[in-house]
Image: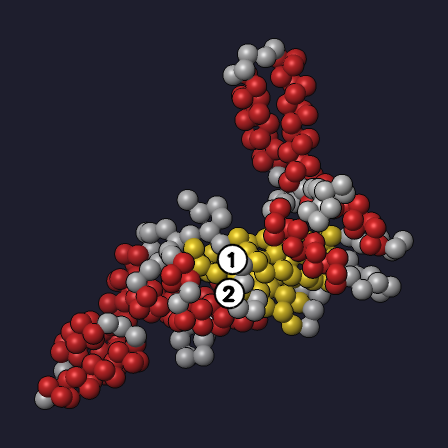
Amino acid sequence: MSSKEILESIKKLREITGVGFKDCKLAIEENNGDIDKSIEYLRKKGIAKASKKMGRIAADGLALIQEKNGTISAIEINSETDFVARNKDFILFCKEISEINFQNKSNLDSLKLSKMKNGKTVDENLISLISKIGEKITIRRSKYFDNKGLNFAYVHNSVEKNIGKVVAIVQLSKNNKKDLKEIGVKLAMHIAAQSPIAIDESGIKKEILDKELEIIKEELKNTGKKTDMIEKIANGKIKKFVSDNTLLNQVWIMDTKMKVSQVIKQHSDGNEIKVLDFVRFKVGEGID
């Protein structure tokens, strides 16, 4: 091949794969100018690059929602930096993944094996994107809400429609006598801001309460208080923990004189409204 032909092949390979000049040049040289073999070569090399990057921490990225016919899904996809989270290729990848996630009802195992528009699986495209961008990228978590209730969503720090850094979805029981959109969206906003861990006390795992109680008692012991006083104070503190972390018992963010349960009751007009489920994804939260 002439120098001009080599350069043309490198240019074509870069356009197809998005990989850097040096790697494309090496691939072309190693495969005697064969584009298909060069793509396969880079793909194998990309897998090697990706595996090295997977040990790093990806705590930035995007959270996305997808809605259709009263059903809704949420997904969090992580990158290492906000710079990549604003990358056009990363955003386009996330959008398509969000659509596939909705179709798979947030089954991540099925999602990873699903084909994308280019005919390759999600896993294969993920590896290629990691190789191209040079950062660890992970599909972290997702949730799907069916139409057994009414679903309302809120996106905070929006990048585009239905894409942001925090997403919250709440599912309310159906009420044929009242439009619940206003209270539903406000509840989703409250959830995004206040981060409840359960609807009420029954939804908090026992191990969480036990651990919290253990920490509270240990802190009180260090102050030198007597055992009976420690028990009394600890019980009060655990009640406050439950109140602060359960949606229905939280202070309403838009009127601190009311609790969420009171606001819901106020909007029910005699027809009981129940919170059936909710989710809140804040990008990177809980990742060490």
Residue at 78% across, 61% down: 180
**Residue 138 can be seen in this image:** no
Query: In the rendered view, does 189 fall on the left or right side of 126?
Result: right
Query: In the rendered view, does 84 fall on the left or right side of 19?
Result: right
> Label 1 sits on what residue type?
Lys
Residue at 61% across, 56% down: 168
Residue at 65% across, 14% down: 229
Q: Element under label 2?
A: loop
Residue highlighted by disc 2: 159
> Label 2 sits on what residue type?
Val
Report the number of discs. Answer: 2
Residue highlighted by disc 1: 165
Report the front residue among 255 and 202.
255
Residue at 24% across, 72% down: 20
Query: What distance separates the C-alpha of mark 2 from that of mark 1?
Result: 8 Å
Q: Residues within 10 Å of mark 2 (few under 14, many from 20)?
A: some
- Say if 92 sits above or below 74 in the image: below
Q: Earlier in the sequence, mark 2 or mark 1?
A: 2
Report the front residue among 227 and 59.
59
Please provide percent x and percent y for residue 54: 33, 55
Q: Would you say the residues marked 2 and 1 are in contact, meaning their CB atoms lie under 8 Å apart?
A: yes
**Residue 6 can be seen in this image:** yes
